[in-house]
Image: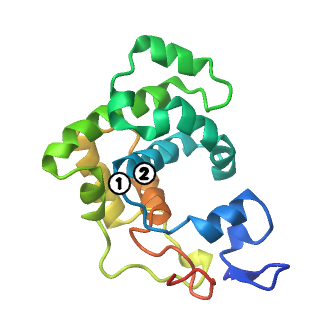
Amino acid sequence: MGPVIGEDGVARCPWAGGPGVMRDYHDTEWGERVSGESAYLERLTLEAFQSGLSWSTILHKRPAFREVFHDFDADAIAAFGPEDVERLMQEARIVRNRLKIEAALTNARATVALREAGGLEEFVLSFAPDPPPAWADTAEMATTSAESTALSKGLKKRGFAFVGPTTMFALMEAIGVFDPHLVGCFRRGS
């Protein structure tokens, strides 16, 4: 399926055709470059929490995630201990999955360690595809790539968790490592 025309007359990627949080995310964030360590750690963490769930669920819970994870300050999260894991397991406003919570702490610590090698942002961007994909139809779209697989392996070697190739592909789409919008979507090339 190619882009769909919404009731507002605008062509969008099919998953964002109707009004609501998903459309808002599509129109203002998805595929937009972010900058800074906390922005990268936030997206990496939320993509991991999304695994097996809908992105809409994560978007609705994002304000709470930002609050309990101190706006994704790597140093603050890296200092969390077992009592913080237990506190987060009781926090109904976020996804309460012990493995994902522990991965968030692991990834914050790995992010701090990665600063010596240029940092998380530089590391992720070094896996940008060349040339980037340009899909016209959802049937053409991938869920992994050689680059997302390489990023996954690279992050795992650096101590990161919950960073499989599919999750890293979604991260690369979300943060604008390449333009994920379908050809014909009003956001393509923006």
Toward the right, the furthest residue is 7
| Element under disc 1 | loop
Other residues around mark 2 within 10 Å, as few (<14) / some (14–19) / many (≥20): some
Q: Is residue 17 above or below residue 123?
A: below
Residue at the (66%, 82%) spot, across then down: 2
Way the structure is coloured: rainbow
Horizontal arrangement in the rendering, residue 19 relative to residue 176 (left or right): right
Q: Residue at x 70, y 73 (%)?
A: 14
Cβ atoms under marks 1 and 2 closer than 8 Å:
yes
Res 89 → quadrant: top right
Residue 148's spot in the image, x, y percent? Answer: 35, 60
Disc 2 target residue: 39
Q: Residues within 10 Å of mark 1 (few under 14, many from 20)?
A: few
Q: Which residue lies under the disc numbered 1?
A: 36
User: Residue type at mark 1?
Assistant: Gly
Identify the image quadrant of residue 107. Answer: top left
Q: If the image is split into quadrants, where does the N terminus sit?
A: bottom right
Please tell me which residue is depicted at 71% across the width and 66% down the height of the picture.
23
